[in-house]
């Protein structure tokens, strides 16, 4: 079953709201690169996990306002999509969701304009909810985007830095991946007037899911084919990303010098050799175990929210992130 069906939500209504934003935008003609780029991006797929999480969060509050929640959900997708446009330019990654990345279709400059426009527009779109009483909307439009940028910068500034620690890795992963997922649940909850305590528990739940997801994503870079990933396998190591499996493998005194020898000028063969050595070292299993630990911690939070019928939806999300049967 698809995630939206399992949650009894409709991705179509989220997509309609996103397209609405583009259609109603008087500053951008429908035929412009910006409007075409955004429309194309939205139609290119994606599971709308973040918007769905906004809507799930709202089930923990007494007053969900459907229109407002759909706008917040669409805003969350806008922020996410804008970050991926920039990410693909930074990573020089030609493919996204099995199709040419936006910068390959429209050009790098155009893609950067589109990404900037989307993330700026989001602030304007939901500023109507940013009155003091509803500060959460500001948190989504502004703080979440800032954290994404900080996370991306942490990753960039630690490229080929084999001295970074597990704490560095987790801080980067929280900023780059987990906090947006966590914010979506929290913001949905606050928009429906849930208590702060419940919203914070939802945030922590989302953060654990996000960290588990990031670790899984790092492992996939070792275990999947280029075709499955939609980008060359082993890209992370080649680009100097010291992901969790690499950190664990660096603890092996025999492996460490080999890993540390990898730099921007390393050949494809050298990278292949190190990828194989890390895979054989047991580091992927250790990383998987930390990913599972985060899922376990998330599960414990569901128990704390068991009085809400919507806690079942958290279980659906947990299973989804665990890669089980949805
Ligand atoms: C995917 O990383 C990228 C992110 C989760 C966020 C990237 C954030 C920015 C580039 C900051 C700019 C954002 C805005 C809105 C101005 P990945 O490369 O590990 O994953 P991938 O395999 O999906 O590319
Ligand atoms: Mg990338």
Image (spheres, grey):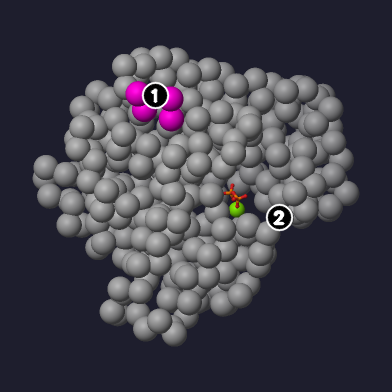
Is 311 included in the stretch rendered in magenta?
yes
Q: Main secondary structure of the magenta part?
A: helix
The answer to which image quadrant residue 24 occupies is bottom left
> On the rendered structure, is 24 left or right of 155?
left
Is 84 included in the stretch rendered in magenta?
no
What range is drawn magenta here? 309-313
Residue placed at 59% from the left, 29% from the top? 322
Is the residue marked 2 within 8 Å of ligand 1, measured from its CB?
no
Of labels 1 and 2, earlier in sequence is: 2
In the image, 224 versus 248, the foreground residue is 224
For disc 2, the marked residue is: 230
The x, y position of residue 284, in whole percent, is 73, 28
Which disc is residue 311 wearing?
1
Q: Nearer the observer, disc 1 or disc 2?
A: 1
The x, y position of residue 172, in whole percent, is 49, 38
SS state under label 1:
helix
Residue placed at 64% from the left, 44% from the top? 241
Residue placed at 44% from the left, 85% from the top? 31
SS state under label 2:
loop
Which disc is residue 286 wearing?
none
Query: Distance from label 1 to label 2 (Cα)?
Result: 34 Å
């Amino acid at each position: 079953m698809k995630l939206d069906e399992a949650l009894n939500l409709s991705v179509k209504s989220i997509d309609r709201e996103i397209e609405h934003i583009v259609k109603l935008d008087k500053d951008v003609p429908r035929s412009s690169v910006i409007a075409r780029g955004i429309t194309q991006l939205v139609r290119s797929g994606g599971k709308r996990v973040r918007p769905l999480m906004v809507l799930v969060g709202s089930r923990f509050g007494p007053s969900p306002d459907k229109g407002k929640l759909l706008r917040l959900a669409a805003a969350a997708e806008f922020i996410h999509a804008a970050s991926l446009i920039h990410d693909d330019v930074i990573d020089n990654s030609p493919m996204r969701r099995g199709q040419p990345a936006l910068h390959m279709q429209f050009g790098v400059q155009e893609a950067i304009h589109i990404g900037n426009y989307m993330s700026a527009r989001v602030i304007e779109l939901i500023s109507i909810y940013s009155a003091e009483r509803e500060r959460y909307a500001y948190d989504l439009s502004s703080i979440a985007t800032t954290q994404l940028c900080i996370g991306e910068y942490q990753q960039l500034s630690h490229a080929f830095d084999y001295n970074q620690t597990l704490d560095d890795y987790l801080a980067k992963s929280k900023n780059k991946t987990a906090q947006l997922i966590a914010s979506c649940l929290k913001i949905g909850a606050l928009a429906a007037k849930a208590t702060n305590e419940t919203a914070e528990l939802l945030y922590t739940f989302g953060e654990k899911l996000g960290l588990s997801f990031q670790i899984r994503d790092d492992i996939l870079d070792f275990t999947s084919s280029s075709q499955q990933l939609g980008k060359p396998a082993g890209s992370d190591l080649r680009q100097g990303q010291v992901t969790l499996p690499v950190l664990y493998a660096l603890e092996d005194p025999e492996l460490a010098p080999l890993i540390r020898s990898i730099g921007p000028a390393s050949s494809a063969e050298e990278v292949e050799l190190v990828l194989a050595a890390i895979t054989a070292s047991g580091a992927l299993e250790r990383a998987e175990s930390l990913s599972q630990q985060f899922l376990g911690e998330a599960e414990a939070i569901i128990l704390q929210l068991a009085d809400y019928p919507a806690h079942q939806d958290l279980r659906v999300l947990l299973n989804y992130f665990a890669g089980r049967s949805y």
